[in-house]
Image (cartoon, helix red, strand yellow):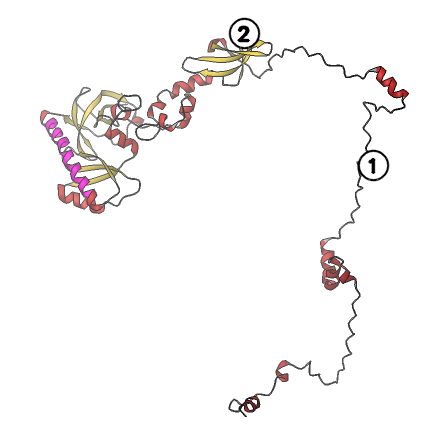
Amino acid sequence: MVTVIGVRFRNAGKLYYFDPKDLAPAPGQAVVVETARGLEYGEVVTGPSEVEDDAITPPLRPVIRIATSEDTAHHAENISREKDAMATCKEKIADHQLQMKLVGCEYTFDNSKILFYFTADKRVDFRLLVKDLASAFHTRIELRQIGVRDEARMMGGLGICGRPLCCSRFLGDFHSVSIKMAKEQNLSLNPTKISGACGRLMCCLQYEEEFYEKVGKELPRVGRAVRTPDGDGVVTEVSILKERVKVRVPKGNDDFEIREYPVAEVQKLSGAKPLPRVERPQDDQEDDAPDPEIMQALKAAEIDVPDDDAPMPLAEDEAEEVETPKERKPRPPREQRQRQRRGNPKQNRETERPSSPANNEKKPSPAPPAPRQENAAPSASSRPAQEQTAPKRDPWTVPEEFRQKRT
């Protein structure tokens, strides 16, 4: 356990712990403390108290002194100088044509550094801007890019409830907020109704989430079968804040009624049971039996009367044709088919082609090739193409065809 005090540097921001040493500042007093940025002026929120070692981020820095009147006047002077620094920085941003929005400015207590906070959609190269600002203020310059939630905290404003924003009043850290919280609280999923000034989901959705999760486990879900004092029914609506449920209970004559019960009077059922059915009186059915006198008259006239249970005979044109399935020959394996195609490809192609009258005509069979004589001289057709070519002409001689034309 370590004795610490809680200090906040802005109206609404994160709470930091410091070692008070021999001092005992009360909540509301101003102190000067040592931070990573140098000396800072802050306000005590919680007095000396003991906390666990896990809750402290090392190193634990000390409190220098309780703020005096001179420290308070110097802090007020720094705040007044921030307005002039904001105007100068905006002019420099416009000169460099940077796509960034300046949100705030802050002087350290010892005036060793000036911090500028901005927002941007993309990463911004502000190296030239830092050089111009350093030459204008003659001190160290630091630019920090922040998110939309931090922007709303620094700018302030009013929420849809009509009150100042929670993040600019008392909220220290930002907690994760999901759309699941809005569903569990039966809120409208319209983004304009559940979004805050920053455009993100409202932080207040997280305030009652723990209560909704705790009570929601005890209440039956919508559509579950429950047992009520009026009988078994099905849950149609659940009110977590009132801890009451609406159940559809059978009323009689196949009608239902929706009634509201407290959670203590409703008991969950392990399995959904079917609601009791009330049988309605059936209407008198008309007697479709034929008149016996008419049937006797038809039989006397030798007219065939079809039986109701017998199938209706079909006409000859309407008779159903029953097709007997054809037996398919087993297909030879793939390797055998490939061998047949390799053996006689021309014959396979002719057999695969559909038969046509032109193909059915007999074609003259080609003459058998003449037997080859070993000692016979090669024919002109079997000579190579180079030997059959015409003799070369002299390029300086004029062909006879052109001579005849000239004459």
Q: Main secondary structure of the magenta part?
A: helix
Instruction: Please say whether residue 89 is one of the residues in the magenta stretch.
Output: yes
Residue beneath the point at 85% across and 23% down: 305
Residue 158 image position (x, y, % from top left): 27, 24
- Bin the neighbour count of mark 1 within 10 Å (Cα to Cα): few under 14, some 14-19, many 20 and up: few
Picture quadrant of residue 133: top left
For the N terminus, the image quarter is top left
Can I make out residue 171 in this image? no
Residue 91 image position (x, y, % from top left): 18, 41
Q: Which mark is residue 230?
A: 2
- Tag 2: amino acid: Asp
Residue 189 image position (x, y, % from top left): 41, 26
Residue 324 lies left or right of residue 51; in this view the side is: right
- The region drawn magenta spans 70-92
Residue 74 position (above or below residue 140): above
The one of 58 and 353 positioned closer to us in this rendering: 353
Can I make out residue 356 in this image? yes
Q: Tell me the residue that label 1 is attached to.
A: 316
Instruction: Please say whether residue 99 is one of the residues in the magenta stretch.
Output: no
The one of 47 and 150 positioned closer to us in this rendering: 150
